[in-house]
Amino acid sequence: MMPFTLLIMILIAFPVSSNGGKWGYNGPNGEHHWPKHFPYCGGAFQSPVNFQPELLRYDPNLFAIQLQNYNLSSREQLTLSNNGHSVQLSLPSYMQLTGLPHRYSAAQLHFHWGTQNVQAGSEHTVNGKQFAAEMHVVHFNSGKYPNISMAVDKSDGLAVLGVFIEVGEFNPAFEKFFKYVNGIKYRDQKVQVPAFNIRELLPSRLDEYYRYDGSLTTPPCFPSVLWTVFRQPVTISLRQYLALATALYSSHAQEVAPMPMLGNYRKPQLMDNRVVLVSFQDGDFTWMSWGSLISIVMASGLGLLLFIAFCWCLLRKRSEADQEKFGADGFHPSERQEKISRV
């Protein structure tokens, strides 16, 4: 009988396919069918989510993310692989996150992206905005669990760094392993690549991020992730983006009909009364939605109109009172004053 640890590793070395039920992002195995084989995918506290302004709460106790041993030696080798759902780069466990409730050790990083024609493939969104792609750097709670296979289904088991990716300037850090993508075009193919400074893949601002409790974004969707999604995106060139969106396949090399690896992202999930903590305060209008901004402007305009109407009514009543006095004694108020002064 297969050992439990080995079984878990096969099922959830994420995002890795499971023998317990095939899954994908479209068609009969698409995300709407995941709960049939993976019950947690239909449960609570799922990821990704849409970071809506009304769900965000500033927390002054959220400090900059602290990284340890992210600058790897080029003498070390990392495994770059195609697992049938994404490009995955293995990471050594001595890479760690500190400053969190537990010590978390790195396991791997992987990507989610759109299509060749639609550069919108991030899993998390910001007020409905979807970025071209998203990178997840996966860590497990090494303070409590010996490996990721033992941590992955625990409520405090994982911590993932999410990085938004936009198409823009060429990124030399990503090119250090993107240039090997042609060696992993098909499912289960692997190549060895020289290690490098993983910190260079992250945005410059590690002190601005969204933080919430969520889940794996792929089956089996365990609600075991402490999410940290950086506010600041990084950029890659269009050529680098197309290396993901056009050069990879979800199928094995020997299959007659290759299946392109496209749109490998899960749609935003329900918040389930969760609150997203943020480490930043925003002083510009981007902090609020356009709907909120329009409502504020309209309410202010309405308030101004009411004030003007009140003042007009007050002046009109005063004018009517003066007219009544004039009609009573035949004198205009100013004339009456002049007559009194002559007496």
Image (cartoon, helix red, strand yellow):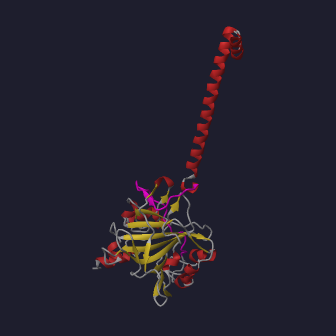
Picture quarter with the N terminus: bottom left
Residue 221 visible, this orientation: no
123 or 251: nearer the eye? 123
Picture quarter with the C terminus: top right
* Percent position of residue 67, x then y: 44, 75
Q: How many marks?
A: 0
14 or 326: nearer the eye? 326
- Whether residue 268 appears in magenta in the rendering, the answer is yes
In terms of image quadrants, where is residue 258?
Answer: bottom right
Residue 244 visible, this orientation: yes
**Vertical comparison of 40 with 172: above or below:** above
* Percent position of residue 329, x then y: 68, 8
179 or 203: nearer the eye? 203
Q: Main secondary structure of the magenta part?
A: loop
* Percent position of residue 152, x then y: 35, 71
**146 relative to 338 in the view: left or right:** left
* Percent position of residue 232, x then y: 54, 67
- Whether residue 7 appears in magenta in the rendering, the answer is no
Which range of residues does the magenta coloring cover?
259-284
Residue under the point 57% across and 41% down: 299
**252 relative to 18 in the view: left or right:** right
**Vertical comparison of 141 with 326: above or below:** below
Residue under the point 49% across and 79% down: 198
Residue ranking furthest to the left: 1
**38 relative to 291 in the view: left or right:** left
In terms of image quadrants, where is residue 287?
Answer: bottom right
**Vertical comparison of 61 with 158: above or below:** above
Residue ranking furthest to the bottom: 75
